[in-house]
Image (cartoon, rainbow, N blue to C red):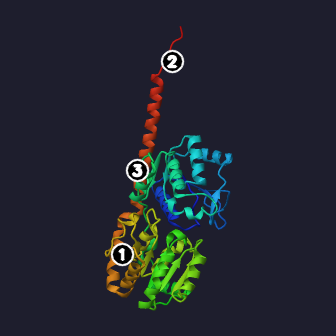
Amino acid sequence: MNIGIFTDTYLPQINGVVSSIVTLEEQLKKQGHNVYIFTISHPQADDNKSYVYRIPSLPFVFLKDHRVGIIYSQKLVNRVKKLKLDIILSQTEFSLGFLAKLISKKLDVPMVHTYHTMYEEYMHYISKGVEFSPELARKYSKMFCNSVDGIVAPTQKTKDLLLSYGVKKPIEVIPTGINFAPFSPSRYTQEDIRTLKEQYHLPQDAPTVLFVGRIAKEKSIDFVLDAFPEVVRHIPKAKFFIVGDGPETSNLKEQVRELQLEDSVIFAGLQPWATIGKFYQLGDVFVSASVSETQGLTFAEAMAAGLPVVAKHDESIEALVQDDYNGRKFITKEELSKALIDLLEDERYRKTLSVHAMSSVAPLSDEIFGQNAMAYYQRILAAKQEAKNQAKAKKHLIKPKKQK
């Protein structure tokens, strides 16, 4: 098939949505399909791939590290028409999502939408001086999702959320799969890890807590920092290694100074997607206090790297992170500190959870994800065709009255 993926976020950006899109793209190609990516222009983009179409974009006024596309272009519509798309897969509810809907309607191409983001958790970005609310986010999500042919939800939590909004279109739960290879410890030598630690002045023997992701308010990294002084009090050599960048970086660095954690916290900044797997090898434990995830792909990536995950209780990861089996769960700051201390101090306990973590993510293979996604797309296409056939048959049954 000819498949168009429309997204506001794509390489060189690094986040869970991009990970999901790249995995889907790779699996659909392996199945023999032609995949075309429609996304925004980006200052750091250096790809010259013929199947990636970038449209002009501007910085998003509320999020300086995000951009929005200037969506309408008759030239682009004509170009898409020549590709003879069989299905459109939208990955955003905003600029490229609008374009996907426009082209879907104009060219009569079925459209399946993946709902990646719980916008109720993100309204703080656009509420400064503007009247936006979680209720508006819910209404907007309902409107957008009810205008497509089918919806993919990464977790049951996301599906339940959309149903509570009043979404009526078919919703399929399809967890995003992972290519385990880049995160496997066997891929890297001890020299690789030693060199990387030296680059970031991370002592070779330091017990290390790792975070990988966007440095944003909804990730609640400040909560982890508040719990970390207690960890350092018990384990003076402990380090908190943060990989990523985002709007909260300067605030978190100020918090580190206030907590006098300058010698215990390392900000590694944004890293290229091609090398992100190596950074997971620096940690002994992965941590996240976020409850805004729709799936928690970084949790699965960490587990594929053999890291026990210490995560805040949340419905989106109930099936993935099992307390005292492949990780630890917490609610309070005190519970978080204790979980980190327990894992960092007890190597045998940590390694047991590590083995369980690696086995737990086996069902999340990228190949199974690709197969499940394609099976759903084919059902949507079949339903769309059946609806067309019924409409055509009904039209022929209604014969015009003969004039006297």
> 299 or 136, which lies in front?
136
Question: Would you call the spot at circle 3 few (<14 residues within 10 Å), some (14-19), or many (20 or more)?
Answer: few
> 280 or 257, which lies in front?
257
Which residue is rendered at x = 43% and y = 61% of the image? 176
- The span from disc 1 to disc 3 (Cα, nearest Å) is 32 Å
Q: Is residue 257 visible?
A: yes
Q: Amino acid at mark 1?
A: Gly
- The span from disc 2 to disc 3 (Cα, nearest Å) is 41 Å
Q: Please report whichever mark, 1 or 2, sits nearer to the chain's N-terminal start.
A: 1
- Residue 215 picture location, percent across and down: 55, 72
- Determine the image quadrant of residue 342: bottom left
Q: Which residue is mark 3?
A: 375
Of all residues, the one furthest to the top in this rendering is: 404
Residue 400 numbered tag: 2
Front tag of 1 and 3: 1
Q: Amino acid at mark 2?
A: Pro
Q: Please report whichever mark, 1 or 3, sits nearer to the chain's N-terminal start.
A: 1
Q: Amino acid at mark 3?
A: Ala
- Residue 173 picture location, percent across and down: 40, 55
Quick check: 216 above or below 376? Answer: below
Q: Secondary structure at mark 3?
A: helix
Front tag of 1 and 2: 1
Side of 378 where 88 appears, left or right: right
Question: Would you call the spot at circle 2 few (<14 residues within 10 Å), some (14-19), or many (20 or more)?
Answer: few
Q: Which residue is mark 1?
A: 327
